[in-house]
Amino acid sequence: MQNFDRLVETVQRNCHVSDARYAGNYSMCTFLLKMREYYRWERGFSPGVSLPHEEVGEWLQERERLWQEIENEGFSPVAVDDHHLDPFDSHGINQLLVPESLVYSGGYGRFSKPLFFLGCLRSEETIRGFRVLVTDNEYARDLSAPPAMTQGRTIYVRRAAIRQMIWESYESWRWRRKEGALERALADYGFEEDVEAALERMTDAVLVLVKEHEVGEALAGELLGPDWEELVMAVAATRGEILARALRDHLADSLATLPRLLAEGESSLWHYYAANLTGMRQALLPAFMPAYERWLASGEDEALAALAGRARQHWERRSRALLERFRSEPRELIAELQKLPEAELALA
């Protein structure tokens, strides 16, 4: 396409502006890990290749200087041929780009951080009425690279981000060699025999799981309506946002992910799901690990199936109750979410 280099430059510049404003939200440890992997992506280093520490340090200083210079800049329109579009008009931009096998997304992520990326179209399909665009190689991206996101009736699934997420999980496990669900998942895909081949196999498998979760997110959005997004925005950058997002994650899983896991019966994906049930999501679902342990011991999935059977009603009921409180007593609910015990919402 015409002016491809300018398109990449504009999208990447918008990514830099967003990072300049929001990079301070990460803990130092998380920030340094993300920056290291961002450098790896930007310079084209494969996973497993040792990075040049001195060059990474110099690059980090240069990037922070750039952020200081552009922190107060606005986001630039995205130019596609003779069209100049708002950077958050993903639909309009993709009408022009998808025929060129390119996919663009401009939206908002956790803590209301603007997120942008431009990637190569890998596949396109329709699932339950939602358009699903799967991308592979990425030409422009933020420091943060969520595996998937939904905008309207379009779902974006980023294979490169899933691959990076799995690699980071493997690296973290390799440092500690901790026994548990992640070790079982990695062993199933053969990481100890051939890391690169295992990474590709696991990426393709987990992509299916990510796709199902994001379809569940979209279905949850239809169930809860636009007021849920207003609730999340009202508690942005607080414990309340973490709690609300975890609650909706579980509703999404109950609508799509868990039924798919039960239908497929693939043990490696159950291990991966268990390994990623952490933080607030784990606190809200204490019933999962006992059911998972029973499945490990017996090979039978009755306990997991029973849990999945209770899940949708439970999460939908809890979510709707919060919405009703938000509609009638928004200030009281916002304050309450900052200290509400997880046990009051949990599926035990």
Image (spheres, rainbow, N blue to C red):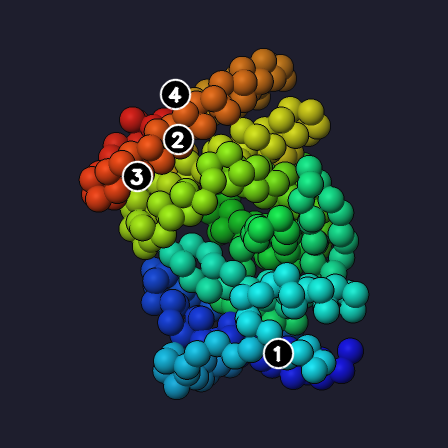
- Residue 320 position in % (x across, y down): 39, 30
In the image, residue 155 above or below residue 341 = below
The tag earlier along the polypeptide, 1 or 3, is: 1
Three-letter amino acid code of the residue under disc 3: Phe
Helix or strand or loop: what does disc 1 sit on? Answer: strand
User: Label 4 vs label 3: CA separation?
Assistant: 25 Å
Q: Quadrant of residue 327?
A: top left
Three-letter amino acid code of the residue under disc 4: Ala
Which of the labelled discs sits on residue 8, or is there none? none
In this orientation, which residue lies closer to the viewer: 53 or 212? 212
The tag earlier along the polypeptide, 2 or 3, is: 2
The tag earlier along the polypeptide, 4 or 3, is: 3
In the image, residue 97 above or below residue 337 = below
Q: Which residue is mark 1?
A: 84
- Name the residue at 55% across, 72% down: 86
Q: Which residue is mark 3?
A: 326
Q: Which residue is mark 4?
A: 348
User: Label 2 vs label 1: CA separation?
Assistant: 40 Å
Which of the labelled discs sits on residue 320, or is there none? 2
Q: Are marks 2 and 1 in contact (CB under 8 Å)?
A: no
Q: Quadrant of residue 334?
A: top left
The quarter of the image holding the C terminus is: top left
- Name the residue at 38% across, 79% down: 71
Three-letter amino acid code of the residue under disc 1: His
In the image, residue 147 above or below residue 53 = above
- Horizontal side of 84 relative to 294 (left or right) equals right
In the image, residue 216 above or below residue 344 = below
Three-letter amino acid code of the residue under disc 2: Arg
User: Label 4 vs label 2: CA separation?
Assistant: 19 Å
The crowding category of the residue bearing disc 1, from other C-alpha atoms within 10 Å (few below 14, some 14 to 19, many at least 20), is few
User: Label 2 vs label 3: CA separation?
Assistant: 10 Å
The tag earlier along the polypeptide, 1 or 4, is: 1
